[in-house]
Image (tube, rainbow, N blue to C red):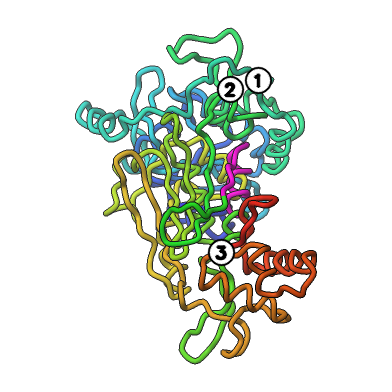
Amino acid sequence: MTLRRRTAAMTPEEVKQMLAAGPSARVAFLPSKTSRQHLAETLAAMANAEGGVILLGVTAKGAPQSDADPAALRDLLMEASLLPDPPIILPSPQTVQVDGVTLLSVYVPEGLPHVYHIRGLYLTRAGHQNRPLTTAELRQLLLDRSESGFESQPVEDATLEDLDVARISRYFDQLGLPPDEDMVEALLSRGCITRRGADGLPLEQPRPTVAGILLFGRNPQRFLRSAEIICVRYAGKSMGDEFVRQDVGGVLAEQARQAEAFVIANMRKGMRIRGMAREETTEYPLPVVREAIVNAIAHRDYSIRGEGIRLLMFSDRLEVYSPGRLPGHVTIENIKDERYSRNEAIVAVLTDLGYIERLGYGIDRMIAAMEEAGLPPPEFEETAAGFRVTLRSAGEELVSVQPQKQRWPHAFLNERQEAALAFVQQHGRITNSDLQALAPDVHPETIRRDLADLVDKNLLIRIGSKRATYYILK
């Protein structure tokens, strides 16, 4: 069978197919009594090759072992993943029931950023066996994976006290790990803490890594000020003085949620005419927006200081810019097909939390969703020091949910509100004084409520405060 990138737990049917097909370069069977050393060697060999799946609790001939203990196999896997140098960060293993027998499925991702060795032994997969890399193969692999992992560096001045224990516990609960799980060992296996300093020498006490602080820190921006998302919504097609801005910080998962909420709150909603039919729509498909945001968070270069992710909304497009050019061997030309992760620990944890497909940019899904919405495909661009994704808006194709004679997409607008919207369309903005001049006999408090109601109806955006307040079209 063809081994695809894993996006969900393996089904019993998939495992049965693997057992029937036998071991290969990307599938390994290991018995429950396998040694920690042999499991570590297989992990390293697959990580240095094209990744794959290891089925633990299976004989060499593909027979499930009824005496396999999933909990003991999980412990064995954690210990084995720490033996290679650097340790291999894996997605959470999955238990699979096959004919009443419980097996452990371990996915080794493709496109990992390091070259792994065990006490100087560099392995790869050849057929269904592990073998040492030749000198030429090792040299080429080192060249291909020359980018060092900043996320694995210890954070200076940070201690384990700077990690949010409650957040870590919720993460472990979501993974289904037992309550007595050793938190330090579990975080070590996920690349969130380290026992080595930046110079490679042992530390007296474990210290959070960059990934650990970004994923579980109490205040990540205290140590990494640029690890934020700057969200801005401009009124027109270019940057101007009229804008709404929100600086999003906190841990990465929270950044993803807040940035998505910003887009939802600031993009147009209405109807699109497709053929002779009218259908409800948003300015951009939400799954595409979510993919663009999460990919920027997961794959940006956090070693670049002084610059965060920028999410910019204009009247005709949305741009997501992340510091750092495309990693490894990924280019604009092969971005749909190639896989390489600059931040394997961040990707692993965000995958466990359900945010992203393991090591997948989701480019094909983004293109398909934009096409389904009748929009141009996403535009991908490398800049001098970063990577930008641009989504083109539905633009003038977004129309009112009301009959054609109704100009605005919300019912129950009074004459003053209709006049206010027409004024903004002509002049670009409106103030309380402007609307008061249009309706001089109306009480100022009624004028204020009219404009506040237009904001609540998702038609206007309020800019400024007190006497400097004005409103623009959303």
For mark 1, what is the residue?
Answer: 160
Q: Is 335 colored magenta in this rendering?
A: no
| Position of residue 167 measured from the top left corner of the image (x, y, whole percent) | 71, 35
Q: Is residue 430 above or below residue 219?
A: below
Q: CA distance from mark 1 to mark 3?
A: 51 Å
Position of 209 with respect to 433 (left or right) is: left
Mark number, residue 208: 2
Q: Which corner quadrant holds the C terminus?
A: bottom right
- 29 or 442, which lies in front? 442
Name the quadrant containing residue 125: top left
Q: Secondary structure at mark 2?
A: strand
Three-letter amino acid code at the position of disc 1: Leu
Q: Secondary structure at mark 3?
A: loop
Q: Which corner quadrant holds the N terminus?
A: bottom left
For mark 3, what is the residue?
Answer: 429
Q: CA distance from mark 1 to mark 2?
A: 6 Å
| Position of residue 100 measured from the top left corner of the image (x, y, whole percent) | 68, 53
The answer to whether mark 1 and mark 2 are in CB contact below 8 A is yes
Q: Residue at x 29, y 52 (%)?
A: 332
Q: Is 257 colored magenta in this rendering?
A: yes
Three-letter amino acid code at the position of disc 2: Pro
Circle 1 or circle 3, nearest the eye: 3
Decide if residue 92 is in sight here.
Answer: no
Q: Is residue 35 above or below residue 429?
A: above
| Position of residue 244 measured from the top left corner of the image (x, y, whole percent) | 57, 52
The answer to whether mark 1 and mark 3 are in CB contact below 8 A is no
